[in-house]
Amino acid sequence: MKILPILTGAAVLAAGIAAWVATRPNPQAPAPAPAAAMPGEAMVQVTLPESLSPEEQLGQRAFDAVCAKCHGPDAAGREGMGPPLVHDYYKPSHHADMAFVMAVQNGVRAHHWTFGDMPPQSGLTGADVKAIIAYVRAVQRANGIR
């Protein structure tokens, strides 16, 4: 009756191998779809600078009053509404400060994102826009965008 323990051991081993094969990740399987983001939800996680200069503080207040409704608090973007400005697309070497000035003055035709065109923004002075840019650049630097 030495065969019974051998058969039992083989059955246990086979069951263990089958369980291991069934639960290991399949590299050929498609990745699960990410959960759908809710409209208005932040698009990126943002780290804020430890401190802001007086001009950057003014820019933050102006950004919060005018820009955040579409670009989200702290420039994190808003799903379905406006892109994050804390993104490599908006680094200084790709979108210089003048691109922000022109966007405020003239609006922007959608070209990186599918949110639609950005309309011109009224009610901001040149000093307001300069301060907003200083704030956005400070937040970008705090997130490694240079």
Image (cartoon, grey):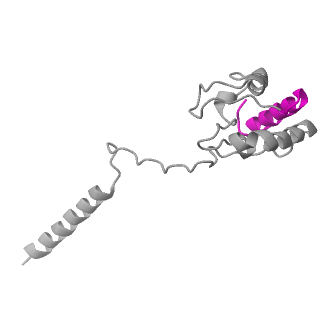
Residue extending farthest right: 54
Answer with the quarter of the image where residue 6 lies: bottom left
Image coordinates for residue 103, horizontal then vertical, percent? 73, 25
Residue extending farthest bottom: 1
Answer with the quarter of the image where residue 4 lies: bottom left
Q: In the image, is residue 75 above or below residue 8?
A: above
Please state, as top left, top right, bottom left or bottom right, where the C terminus lies in the image. Answer: top right
The residue at the point 14 percent across, 75 percent down is 5
Q: In the image, is residue 93 above or below residue 85?
A: above
Answer with the quarter of the image where residue 68 lies: top right
Q: Is residue 41 left or right of residue 59?
A: left
Image coordinates for residue 42, horizontal then vertical, percent? 64, 47
Image coordinates for residue 59, horizontal then vertical, percent? 85, 38
The residue at the point 71 percent across, 26 percent down is 107
Total labels drawn:
0
The residue at the point 70 percent across, 33 percent down is 145
Q: In the image, is residue 116 above or below residue 40?
A: above
Q: Is residue 11 left or right of residue 143?
A: left
Closest to the observer, 82 or 8: 82
What's the magenta bit mostly, secondary-structure-wise?
helix
The residue at the point 74 percent across, 44 percent down is 74
Image coordinates for residue 1, horizontal then vertical, percent? 6, 78
Closest to the observer, 76 or 15: 76
Q: Is residue 100 magenta?
A: no
Q: What's drawn in magenta, residue-wise?
A: 123-146
